[in-house]
Image (spheres, rainbow, N blue to C red):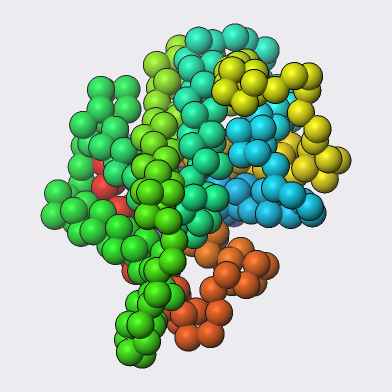
Amino acid sequence: STRRRSFPVCTCEVRALPEISSCGAGTGLERELAEHCEELASGLRRAAAGGEFGTVAFALAALSSFFNGSFPACARFPKGPELDPVLFNGLVCAGVFLSSLLVPTAFSVPWVFTGGGAAGGMLFVFAALFSFVAIPRAGLATAQAVWSCSAIMVSFAWGVFGPPEIAAPVGDAAGSAAAVALLLAGALVIVNCEAITKRISGVEAQDTENEDERAAGIASALAVGLFGGSVLVPFKFIPAEAAGLTALPSFGLGALLAGLLVTAAYWKGVQKEDGFPAIASDQLVAGLASGVLWNAGNVCSIIAQSPPYSLPYGIAYPILQCALFFGGLWGIYAFKEIEGAAIPTFWAGAATLAGGIVLLSSYGPGA
């Protein structure tokens, strides 16, 4: 009878592709089959891991956007007279510092001081300061949209034109330009949703705001974007062993020291007040909570840009600055700032903004 030569069947198993069992291998053709089996399974595992990491990275960036869009709302919760925005900013800086102290324990990173981390904290102080100066002058919705657009352009410019530590190759120039255009268009629709709705319905919008105050508010919001879009840039120059979350306590310390200096200079030098300011308990809690929320977004953004996720800066930070979408949600459902027919206009702007995010992730720096 004719003898038939049999070959072993590859017994590799893939369970969510985290690991793979070895294929039985003999000699010659059997060993070759085993090697091909291992190579195929390894490729599948890498592809799945890359997809999982990409999904997590974008989820973290979106979560950072939520926190960044929610921290200014804390200033609206205290009852009674509004706290001076510079004093509120000092409380926010304290909240950032206190929450930064939790990072080494929560994420098992060493206690290391870095100058780059402290520099990022100092940049944050001025970004937050100008935000709370802009809000009472230009309004929360307008101010947040302006500083988000400004920060998008600044952070995108860092991602495209910055030094090698920050910049990444642009996937497609035309696609990136279209993404930026959609982001800006979406932001403009969101911030002007009520005016657009009135114009479409033929209602004259009466402007009773002080133009000088509004101009000062918009200028302050632009300054927020300049500082805010650069907050994490110093992190890129920190040695690898001290970068990322390890630099957060230094960031918090820089924010606290600069915040104390700015607040004291304002209270004593500009306001010329004696003693310490009177701060109600709910104002204290709101200020600290605002700092904690912002820092939570900062942590999410840092993790998204660090290995193994490594989302490019030019993509991660523009997504973070789309926080005005969540600011709009606060305005609609919590503070009733946007009502009636203006709500669909808001969602149209939000959809345009989301389209910009998708394009940026597909064609932006590092895509």
Residue at 20% from the left image edge and 42% from the top image edge: 170
Q: Residue furthest right?
A: 281
Residue at 43% from the left image edge and 75% from the top image edge: 194
**Where's the N terminus, which quadrant?**
bottom left
Q: Does residue 179 appear in this view?
A: no
Q: Residue furthest bottom?
A: 201
- Between 276 and 59, the residue placed more toward the observer is 276
Residue 237 position by quadrant: top left
Q: Does residue 69 appear in this view?
A: yes
> In the rendering, at what x and y percent does residue 286 appear?
75, 44
Q: Is residue 327 left or right of residue 171?
A: right
Measured along the vertical axis of the image, is residue 184 above or below residue 230? below
Measured along the vertical axis of the image, is residue 196 above or below residue 292? below
- Between 221 and 106, the residue placed more toward the observer is 221
> In the rendering, at what x and y percent does residue 172 appear?
17, 50
Residue at 30% from the left image edge and 58% from the top image edge: 184
- Between 19 and 264, the residue placed more toward the observer is 264
Residue at 25% from the left image edge and 22% from the top image edge: 163
> In the rendering, at what x and y percent does residue 182 appear?
28, 62
Q: Is residue 71 left or right of residue 5?
A: right
> In the rendering, at what x and y percent does residue 361 appear?
33, 52
- Between 108 and 272, the residue placed more toward the observer is 272
Q: Is residue 64 left or right of residue 285?
A: left
